[in-house]
Structure formats: C-alpha cells, structure tokens
Image: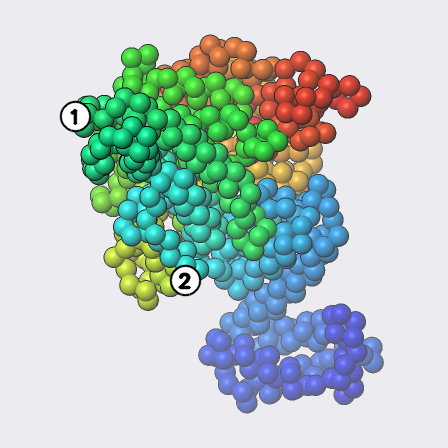
Amino acid sequence: MFKKIKKRDGKIVNFNPEKIADAIAKAGSATEEFKADRAKALADKVLKKAEETITARTPSVEQIQDIVEEVLMESSFKRTAREYIRFRQERSRVRDAKSDLMNIYKTISHADASEDSDVKRSNANVDGNSAMGKMLQFGAEGAKVFAKSLMLRPDIAAAHDNGDIHIHDLDFYATGTLTCCQSDPFVLFENGGFNTGHGHLRTPNSIGSYGALAAILLQANQNEQHGGQSIPNFDYAMAPGVNKSFRKALKRNLEKYNKFSGKKLDLEVKETYEFGDDEKLKKAKWPKEVIEASNEDVDRETLQAMEGFIHNLNTMHSRAGAQVPFTSINFGTDTTPAGRLVSKYLLQATENGLGKGETPIFPISIFKVKSGINYEPDDPNYDLFKKSMEVSAKRLFPNFCFIDAPYNLKYYKKGDYRTEIATMGCRTRVFASVFPESDGIVTGRGNCSFTTVNLVRIGIKHGICLKERKEADWDGFYKELDEKMDLVKDELLERFEFQANQHVRNFPFLMGQGNWFGSEKLGWNDTLRDVIKHGTLSIGFIGLAETLVAMVGKHHGEDADARELGLDIITHMREKCDEYCKKYHLNFSLLATPAEGIAGRFTRIDRKEYGKIKGVTDRDFYTNSFHVPVYYPISAFDKIEIEAPYHNLCNAGHITYIELDGDPSQNIAAFEAVIRKMHDCGIGYGSVNHPVDRDPVCGFSGIIKGERCPHCGRLEGDTPFEKVANCTKGN
C-alpha cells in the first residue's frame, strides 16, 4: 500500500484510499447505477491494479485517476465511467482557468495599460494604470472565471475561450445586470424627483439643475448596468428647465424694473409663460427691455448648464471611481424655442471644448436628422443641422442619426419623441419589439445582452484561403454558421433567464425608480421578467470583409459578386434572428459588432491556429462588422452605397464611418454632402472621422490652424503638435 501521493502542484501528502471510494461513489450516485458498497468494491480493484502497475513509491494523482477510469470502463457501469471522466475533465478545466487567472492577475498588477494586452484594453473607459482601475480589472477577470466555470454550459464556455464566439461583458454575467438603457428624464424629473440610493433629489427648477441632474441620472444608471447610458430626447427633456429659468428671470427682472422705475407692474408670472412665446408675452404688456433681459439671462444660464453637463460627464466617475460613464445623448428635433435653445448651446459647449480646449469624449452626441424638422432650408431647425455639421467638422461630434431611413420612419409619429429613433454609445439600437406596447418605442428600453460570432473563422474553415479547395464550401459555411448562432441563442436565453430572476431591489435606481419600461408597476421584491422582455437579445458578427476574402478571395468593397455574397450572409443571419423572435417571443436582433476590444482577440487566436493569411489574418484586427476595410481605397460615396443595405439588416445596431483627410471645417459643403448622401441612401447612423490635432504641452485637442496653439498661444517650435484620432471612434 502506498504511503504518500504527489499532488498536481508537486506537494507530497499522505495517501488516503478512502478518497478513491468517495469519488467513485459520487459518480455512481450521479448516474444512480450503484451505491456506496459497490463503490468500495470498485475502489479496492483500483488499489490492487495500482499496486500491480505503478512502480514508483509515490504515485501521482493523475496516475491513480487514470486507473479509476480504466476500472470503471472495464466494469458494467459505463454511464458512471463517462460521468467520472466528465467530472475529471471539468475539474481540470476549472484548475486550468484558475492557473490562467493567476497569470492574468500578474498582467494586471505589473503590465502597463499601453502594452498589447486584451486584459488591459478590454474596457477603453477604465484607467488600467490607476489603483481603482486595477481593482476593477481584478474583480472583472475573477468574475469571468466564475461565470465560465459555474454558470455557463461547458460547450458555451469552451466556444468563448477558443474564439468561436465572444460573450460581451462576461465579467458582469453573474451580477445579472443588463447592458444599457435609453432613459427618459421626464419620468424622473417631473414626478417628484428621484432617489439615487444615497438621497432623494427634488424636481429641478432651473436649466442648470436639469443639466446637473441629467448627468447624475446617467451616472446612477451606469452603476447598475454594464453598458452605455443614453438620453434619447435630450432637447425635449431639458426644455422645461429652460422655461422654468425663464419664468424666474422674468420675475426677477420685473422686480428690478419696478424698483428702479418706481412703477408697479404686475409681478404674476404664470406657469404657461414659456421662453420665446411672443404672443403670450405681448398680452402681458411688459416692457421690451424686461423681456430682452430675461432672454439674455436664460441664454447665459443655458450655455452654462450645457457646459456643466459636458464637464460633469467627462470628470464624474462610476464603478468604484475607476470609470467615466459611457454616455450618449440624442437631440435636434424639438422645434420649441426652449428645445432649440438647448440644442444650440449644447452644440456651442461641445465646440468650446473642455477646460484646456480638449475635445470632449463624452457624451457621444447624436444629432437626429428629419426632413420637415431640420433637413431642408425652410425647416424650423435647419440652422441647428448646419451648426451640428460645423461642430462635428471641428470636434468629431455630433454623429448623425437618420429618422427618415425607411426602417426608422415607419415608427415615427410627429410630436412623439418616443417614436424618434435614437442610438446608444457607438451604435446600439433598440426600437422594434414583439410586444405591441413597446414596439417602436425607444424610451425606457435597452439591450439585455449580446454575444458575437467569429464569422471570419467560419470563412477560413470553409473558404479557399487555406488552398485546400478551389471553390468555397457554402453549404458547410451556412451549416456551421447556423450551429454557432444556435449556440449563441442558447447562451443568450440562459443569460436572460438569470437576469429575469433578479429582483427590483437588486436595481434600486434602474428598476426601483421606474427608469426601465414598465418597471414602475413592479414591487420591491418582484422579479424582472415582465419588464426586461422589452429589451433586446443581440447576436453580433465581426469581420465580414475578411470572411469574404477567406471564402472567395475578395471583399465586398472590391468586387460586385462578393458584395452580393456579403448581403446573402448577413440576410441569412437576420432571418435566423427573426426566427428566434417568433419561436421564443423575445426580441432577438442582429448587431453589427464594433471592432474595439474583440476583433484583435479573434485575430490573434485565428492566426495562431491557421497562420498568417493575406487579407484575412495578416493585420492586427478584423474589420468592424460589415464595414469596407479602412485600409482599402474607396470614395466616401461608394463606401456609403455599399454599406447602406446592411443598416436595414442589422436591427440591433449599425454605423457607417467615413474618413476625411485634412481639416473638414474648411470645407463644410463637402462635409454636408457626405451627411446628405448618408440620408438619401438609407443609412441609419453615420459618423465622419478626421484628424484631430493635439498640443502635447498644454493638452489642447482639436483643430490647430497654423503654427500657434489656440489654447495656450505657444508656437509649435521644437515640440511639434500631434495628429491623433479620437479613441471612441472605430474603423
């Protein structure tokens, strides 16, 4: 009988034969093939065989377990043998994950955030060099291991690890959080205020308070979700604040007028008086100078409020102080004087930049374009559309969302901001719904979770790029694509079930304050199924361009036949998502996944497996979703025409980027031509990228004309200005 045994970590410990019987008994109990007495007899056979075959005085754990497998396989208890083998493999996977986790922790602790590491760049909004940023990453990586080891099906976890799929925000899987939400400030502001969990905030009574509370709203929601936060109706939501400030200014200026003129004008300022409502103000018969002074006061206060809002969102933190909230706001369609004033000064504040003139990263501002509202010269908000392009040409933002795209326009109801398409973050779209009450409504809804299929790998395996076949195997391609989509569907459903069984008390702001669609009807201890069903479950894809090169040798930007094949692939994926909608009565949707974070991971895994393949794995990243590769020379108009059809197919989110050289602020007509081409081609969401200058001495970022920094005034001299790209924009 052995006295000692060697563990996997090399330690020598006392040999305990009872552990063998216990392990066999557990396997037998799981299959219900036998009980403890039979396990003892089988364990005795293991010990006898070990003594006969192992020559070492101190056997290893693996040697004993190998013999357990042999004895079970030689017995009549085949199901128990398979269960023991499965259990052993699962334990091995967990141990490997723990070992990998320790290596990841070492990277977090010792590597610099600028190093080439998926861990350090997994969230661009987290400062991976800060103490709290590292703490957040430690927790995130440990949470991923927990989710993969104990929550996910083994085949799903394996598919994520080997790069067949990518489960986004896996570190939040065990928390049950949802991805994002399109918050309507009206819900929170106009019904007595709201509670952030640390104190109650009253209904705001000035535009300054509206702007401050809007930032707090986004921050509070970010602390309960793992994705971006959006306000889809920013100008509409802030307009009441402008009117409240105007009434205050009116009363204040009337009091001043009476004091210095000696007159006794009526000081009653009715709640119906609004900024810019000339007809009502004329009937009051107040002096012109009082009205003008009040308008000037509100102008100044609104600009300050918008500047404060932008400064807050670029400096306030969420998630233990390690992350700036990822925020976006949609605006440009409120035609009331108050709403127009909000849009005007939001654009002005964006153009002014931050304290040192830096281009604000957040919020991602999105100008909603609508014919009859702001698109044509005689539209009431046309001046704001023009201004939005001037600001974007200088500051990269706003981006542009097109209500007139047919798949958006069909939901549009004039005067109902809930039916105006809005976008979250860099592309997320939540609009259609299988539930009539939320169909075509943006407010209060968001994405529940999303997972991406590595489309390129399927292309490599079934295409011509490995030179194993002369023609692409399209039957094999679509068969495997369906298998991967079914796997992702199963994962999304499992995650949804876990999320659905969370309680309102787990999300005291998002659900407890009625921010999510329908959550105002729930009680504190209610579960969330009845409301999160209005969110989306999204299946994403990456690298259509590389997929087509792998399959047929050319991508959709360079070949008309490849263009049709690309549309066939994405149409097939959309149809599968629609089938899932009908089968499960949930909002499955197709996402044009962004390249940030995920595309490099897929590429490295595939290059290791298949080698460097020209046009496929020979670059550091796969191309963003359905985009024509950024390195491929193509005109802006051609790129728009090629990518436009995919916007209709990718109902969970999409974007088209156009790259312009030089300073577009010097050619606004060309900038406008690009935006109008997007509108006319049915693009849903578009953006224009261009170089941005940076002064490394004072930190200014923006357009620098000539040799002098517009912020600090220094001449370029020996320290040259830098050309940089905005980190929040993709290829």
Q: Quadrant of residue 406?
A: top left
Q: How is the structure coloured here? A: rainbow
Determine whether 104 is above or below 82 in the image: above
Drawn side of residue 28 relative to residue 504, left or right = right
Please name the residue that numbered disc 1 is placed on. 283
Left or right of 188? Residue 283 is left
Question: Disc 1 marks which amino acid?
Answer: Lys
Q: Is residue 82 above or below residue 558?
A: below
Identify the residue at horizontal 55%, vertical 89% (top origin). Answer: 37
Q: Residues within 10 Å of mark 1 (few under 14, many from 20)?
A: few
Which residue reaches farthest front?
262
Q: Which mark is residue 506?
A: 2
- Residue placed at 45% from the left, 34% from the top? 304
Q: Which residue occupies 38% across, 57% down?
A: 200
Res 291 quadrant in image: top left
Left or right: 560, with 529 as reference point? right
Residue situated in front as seen by the camera: 20 or 389 = 389
Q: Is residue 692 visible?
A: no
Q: Residue 166: x percent and y percent?
A: 53, 46
State the SS at label 1. helix
Give whichever of 555, 58 is nearer the camera: 555
Q: Which mark is residue 137?
A: none
Residue 122 location, quadrant: top right
The answer to whether residue 351 is seen in the rendering is yes
Q: Residue 682: percent from the left, percent from the top?
A: 36, 21
Kind of residue sitting beneath label 2: Asn
Residue farthest along the bottom direction in this orientation: 37
Viewer-proximal residue, 22 or 73? 22
Q: Can you say which quadrant of the picture contains the N terminus?
A: bottom right
